[in-house]
Image: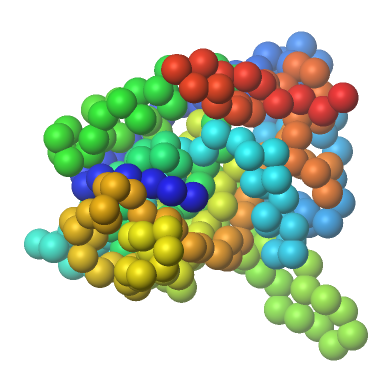
Amino acid sequence: MRVPHASGGPGILGSPGGAAEREAGRSKSARGGESASVCSDGNAGADVGEDPLAVVTVPPHMCARLLFPNPVCLLTTAAARDAAPSSEVTNQPAADAPERPEPLQVNVMTLSWLTPIDNHVLLNVPTKGMEETVVAVGSCSGKDLGDKMRHLGIGSCFPGWGYAQPKTPKRKGKAASGCQNSGDVSGFGVGVPGVSDCIAHAVCTVQSIQDQPDGASRRKPGGDAGREGPAGHALIFGRIDRAYVRAGWWDGRNFAPRRRDLPPFLTFLGSKRFAYVRPE
């Protein structure tokens, strides 16, 4: 992806569920069901009739399928504040779905407005009903606002919404089931927040940043982030390390809404216009 440099700003915030949660909640209320969030094996689609907002951990070999439809994404980054001690998030209670803790310096941007604060980022997939948020994120800079997420009222959470359970140790002759703890991001340096209203989170590591398309200038993540390439853009190479998706948008193989009453995710047409992605 080609992206212009932008400075990150701090922000910490929690908010009620977004369009996807409201739509699913209305449908669940009509059936007389209660809201619940669980973690399930991503190799098979969860029973979407039970809870479309249940959290599924996507198998590693299928993580890239979240990006096959080219959905609009919000990208979040984080780094420990210079004047504060390191804040790694470990073993948060799954049932509490905690907000991310301080101290973190974070930024949020659309995929075409990016400079990572360090080499860890998180892709968040919004749905219909979040168009104004996407436009607002792409229309301002955390460098100017100082606290972009709070300024825009964007809720944050742990990757996987804090509901994923710790991985089950492997047993002899059996593969491990269960999911990696979404609150344990110590392997990624600092806790990169997710956008709580989105329906998919992909935790990524930036492997290199290329300032020129011909490869003449390439730097490692965390280098001179303020230096701009010849056209003010950079080409980011990254790897998806793990991903989480709401069950209503994952059938075990494909990323798409599984019911007509669930909001579709977005594709961008340009000039602040969006279209919506639904399977036939």
Q: Quadrant of the C terminus?
A: top right
262 horizontally vs 158: left or right: right
Identify the colour scheme used.
rainbow
The relative height of residue 61 versus residue 229 in the rendered view (above or below) is below
Front residue of 264 and 167:
264
Q: Would you identify the image quadrant in which residue 4 lies?
A: top left
201 horizontally vs 189: left or right: right
**Residue at image x 72%, y 22%?**
262
The relative height of residue 9 versus residue 215 in the rendered view (above or below) is above
x and y, in percent, of residue 23 in the image: 65, 17
x and y, in percent, of residue 202 in the image: 56, 52
**Residue at image x 22%, y 47%?**
7
The relative height of residue 153 versus residue 204 in the rendered view (above or below) is above
x and y, in percent, of residue 89 in the image: 39, 62
Q: Would you identify the image quadrant in which residue 37 lies?
A: top right
x and y, in percent, of residue 29 in the image: 72, 15
